[in-house]
Image: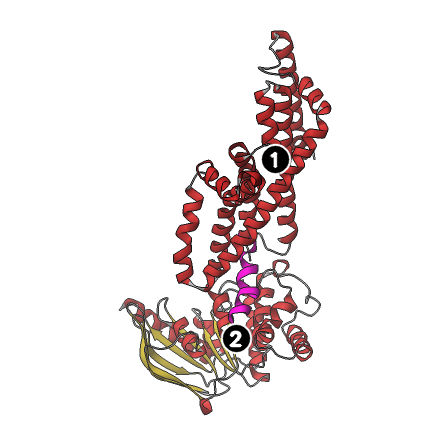
Amino acid sequence: MFKFNKIYKEYDTPILGPLSLDIKKNSFVSILGSSGAGKSTLLRLASGLIKPTSGSVEYFNNRKPNIGFVFQDPTLLPWRSVIDNVLLPTELTFKNKKVSKEKAYFWLSKVGLEGKENYLPNQLSGGQKMRVSIARAMVQDCSLLLMDEPFAALDEVSRNKLEDDLLDIWKKNKLTVLFVTHSVTEAVYLAERVLVMSSSPGKILDDVFITEKKLRDDGQQSNEFFSKINYLTNILKKESNE
Amino acid sequence: MIKRYLSFLAPIISFLLLLFVWEMTVNFQSIPKYILPAPTDIFTSLLLNYSDLLRSTFITFRITFFAFTIASLLAIFIAILFSQSKIIELSLYPIAVIFQVTPVVAIAPLILIWVGLDNAEYAILILAVIVAFFPVLANANLGIRSVERNLCELFSLYEANRFQRLFKLQLPYALPFILTGMKTSIGLALIGSVVAEFVAGSGTSTGLAWRIIEAGNRLDVPKLFAALILLVLLGIILFLIMSLLEKTLLKRWDIDKS
């Protein structure tokens, strides 16, 4: 999908890198790390919102994919209704209105907000706002979805539900997802690959592929799932002690 | 429920009580009308001079309204210019501050000379605009600059152009700030038009300030009070209209701006 090629970013001090990374198409990658590890900077570099100080981001076939970005806050425009918020990216890129509207309705129903199209953001719960934000990211048929701690502010029930819905969207839509989180459990539950980052400046400390079955036949989490969590937690603990 | 009625009734009752004490004091102490007229004298004067006073109220309202409108539009336009170019902001903002800190009475004679003594109403209008302009500019500028970083990045991600950014993000985002500025500005426009009329007014512009000067010169204090009451009422009405406009326009906004 894309590559970070010896990427390095600094403002007044070094923030990230140098690091090289290859993100495969249709993969779900979680990024773990303490605060200040440059996780959000990594997402912003991937999206092209900021440029690296040195190194480069190389997209597959040298073509920047359609990118959807979900921030930690829902970042909805309070004066716009739910449907108008979802339509925003299509308006900004001058897409066909009729087709865009159909897509917006489709994605709103996908994220469970059917019938709430004309609500205002202040009439929605935190979880529902985040769902609008996901629908907005998806409305442009994005192939790369960047998520910066999107469920951090939600309660556990909403969070679990949204995680399952996100997995469902990922599986059905041939998406590549880069998901920043502080939660080890969330990272292991969602991703096929977990990148652990060290801080000051941010570098890849470990690159863990999760190939084992996460759930047993009875729907409970498997032993392998817990052993991966323990393994990643220990790396993070070690990193914070150093 | 009782609390709700109380909050409404309490100021009315205390106001009526004040009027009663005032009336009694003036009557029992035999205070002359040219020092302190009784509320009934003021009311009588209001009825006797209602035609003159209403015409003057309308003139003051007209100047205030135009000054407020011109100041608001000009301030929003300049705030937009500031948002588009840091150089323009750095160049013009100090000039705006100079206008803000210079007392309007100090520049009134100059403005009057420039527009001509026959056009005193224009001079008053210009002075009122100067007084009302800055709060809208400062608030609009702040609002446009306060747009959340994530929202700016969202617009950058979809490569929004300058106009899309301005009209779909910055201006709507700044609306609560602009309206706060306008609420302050409408009161200042009224104060500005009255003060300007005091210093630059002449027989050609007979707003409420002129009536106050005229009544003061003739020691017609009941009429002076009547003009003053109309001025206060005008200020309250303008503020209420602005508050209503703010409430209507911000219906969609969350209190914490979501």
Please name the residue that numbered disc 1 is placed on. B204
Q: What x and y, as percent, mark residue B54?
A: 69, 32
Extreme residue toward the left, this view: A242
Residue A77 visible: yes
A79 w.r.t. A54: above or below = above
Q: Amino acid at mark 1?
A: Thr
Please name the residue that numbered disc 2 is placed on. B158
Whole-Å distance between the Cαs marked 1 and 2? 57 Å
User: Which residue is nearer to you in this view: B150 or A207?
Assistant: B150
Residue B256 visible: no
| Quarter of the figure with residue A107 | bottom right
Badge 2, how many Cα within 10 Å: few under 14, some, many 20+?
Answer: some
User: Which residue is nearer to you in this view: A56 or B106?
Assistant: B106
Extreme residue toward the bottom, this view: A61
The residue depicted at 44 percent of the width and 83 percent of the height is A210
Residues rendered magenta in the picture: B159-177
Q: Amino acid at mark 2?
A: Tyr
Name the front one of labels 1 and 2.
Answer: 1
Q: Is residue A119 left or right of residue A1?
A: right
Q: Which chain is home to disc 2? A: B
Q: How is the image coloured?
A: secondary structure
B176 drawn magenta? yes
Badge 1, how many Cα within 10 Å: few under 14, some, many 20+?
Answer: few
- Does label 1 or label 2 sit earlier along the sequence? 2
